[in-house]
Amino acid sequence: MAAHALPATQRALKVAGANKVAVQMACPLPTLQDDEVLVRVRCASINPVDAKMLDLAPHVGATAGCEFAGDVVTVGAGVRNPAMAVGVAVFGCVCGNHPERADNGAYADYVAVAGDLVYLLPSHLTYAEGASLGAAMPTVGMALYSTWPLHTPQTRPQTPPQSLRADGSTTTTTTTSSTTTNQTRLAAAVEAADRAAAATTTTTTTNAGLAAGAAATTATTTTATAANYNHYVLVYGASTTCGALALQMLRYSGMVPVAVCSPSNFAMVTARGADAAFDYHDPACADNIRRHTHSSLGYVLDCIGDVASMKICYAAMGAAGGRYMALNPFPLRAHSRRDVKPDYVLVYTIFGKEMKLPRPFGRPARPKDRAFAEAWYRSTQSLVDTPAAIIPHPIRHGSGLADILPGLDCMRQASITGIKLVYQINDTPC
Ligand SMILES: NC(=O)c1ccc[n+]([C@@H]2O[C@H](COP(=O)([O-])OP(=O)(O)OC[C@H]3O[C@@H](n4cnc5c(N)ncnc54)[C@H](OP(=O)(O)O)[C@@H]3O)[C@@H](O)[C@H]2O)c1
C-alpha cells in the first residue's frame, strides 16, 4: 500500500468551554508517539463520557471524542504489534478532551493510538460498527475481566466455573465442544451456559447456602472474599452499549447474565444473551432478581452507577454479598453492605498513564491496567474476527463533525435508548 500523503492541517471538533465544542478547519495533526499508529478517521461515535467530560472537565483547545474507526496511515517506529501496517483498517478508543494531548481526539480527520491498544477491523464489520465498539470493548474488558475471576471470553462454548470465588480462585471448570454450524456463535454460547447452569443450579444454591451458614458460624473470619457465588452476573443498564456487549462477553465466558433495563429493550437484551430481563422502574425489581438468582448473585456490573441503580443492585445480591463494579464513580453513600466490595473502572487507565483530570475522573498511572489491556486486545481479537460472534449495538448514522454537536445534546438529555450515535467523518462512506 502506497504511503498516505498527510495534509499540513486537519479538521477537528475542539473544546471551546464547558458544554461547548466547535469545528475548526486548520488544526495541527496529532504528534505521533513512538508506540502509536496514526489513523485516518472514517467514523467516530458518541460516548456518554464525551458529553460528561465536556461538561465536568472541559479542556479548552483539546480535540474531543474517544471512539473511532479508520485506516492506519503511519506506523510509529516503536510499534510492536506486527499486524499494524499502512492501509490496515482498525477501530479503538483514545482519551478525547485530553489535558496534555490537546491535538489528539476521535472527532478529527486523524487520531493517534497505541499500536497495542487497537483492534483490526474485520471485513464483516463496517467502520460504523467498529466505531460503535471502540470504547465498549476495553471498558467491558476492564470491568469484568481485570479483577473478577471469569474465563476470558471465547467463541467455543464454556461452562461456568462451578464455584466462583471472589478471591480469584475457581473450582471445576469444563469446556464443551462447539456445535455452531447452524447457529450464531452467541446462540451456541447461550445454549451451552444455560445447559451448564441448569445442571449446577442445585449445587450452586447449596454452595451459597453453605457460605451463608459458614458466615453465621465463623462471623469473625469469613468475609465476602471467601464466599461461593453462582453463575449469574447482573448487568444493570443492560441496554446501554456497554451493557449489551457485556451480556455477550459473559455468555462467551460461560456465565449467565441477567439484565436490568426498560421493557422496551427487553427483546434486544434477550437477543444479546440475557437469561431474564427486569424493569428498573418496577419497585419489586430487586426482589424479582433475587428470586430468579436463588439469592446467590455475587457479581454485578452497574453501567449506570447512581444512587437508584446501586440500591437495586445491592438489594438484588445474594446472601453472601459479592463484587459490585460500576462504570461511573459510584456514590459512596449508597454503599450499604459490608459484604459487598464496590469498585469503579475508567477505561482511560488502559493507557498506563496518569489521567490528570479533576475529580471524579482523575486517576493515577496504573501500569498493570496497560498490561491487562494489551493482553485483552490480543485475546479478544479472534472474537472480533469471528463473523456474527459480536452483535454491535443498533446504530443511528450521522454525517460530518458539525452533526456531532446535536448528538452530544441528545446524550446530555439522556434521550438515547438502545442505540449508538455514529458519524461519518471524512468523505469516504462508512
Ligand atoms: N468507566 C468508563 O470507562 C466508561 C466507559 C464507557 C462508558 N461509561 C459510562 O457507562 C455508561 C453507559 O455507557 P454507554 O455508552 O454504554 O451508554 P448508552 O449506550 O448511551 O446508554 C443508553 C441507555 O442508558 C440507559 N439508561 C439511562 N439512564 C438509566 C437509568 N437511570 N437506569 C437504567 N438505565 C438507564 C437507557 O436504557 P433504557 O432505555 O433501557 O432505560 C439507554 O438505553 C455511561 O454512564 C457512560 O458514561 C463509562
Image (cartoon, helix red, strand yellow):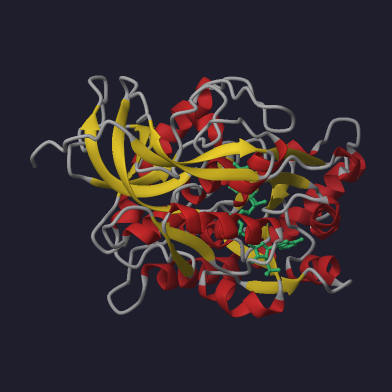
Place of residue 265 in the rendered image (x, y in percent of width and height, measured from the top left): 63, 75
Camera sees residue 310:
yes
Displayed quadrant of residue 295: bottom right
Residue at horizontal 56 percent and vertical 54 percent from the top: 405
* In-image side of 110 versus 105 (left or right): left
The one nearer the camera, 127 or 167, is 127
* In-image side of 115 versus 232 (left or right): left
The one nearer the camera, 398 or 417, is 398
Above or below, 333 relative to 362: below
Residue at horizontal 68 percent and vertical 67 percent from the top: 415
Above or below, 139 relative to 286: above
| Ligand 1's quadrant | bottom right
Q: Quarter of the image containing the N terminus?
A: top left
Q: How many marks?
A: 0
Residue at horizontal 60 percent and vertical 37 percent from the top: 16
Place of residue 94 in the rendered image (x, y in percent of width and height, measured from the top left): 46, 37
Residue lying farthest to the front in this orientation: 25
Q: Quarter of the image containing the C terminus?
A: bottom left
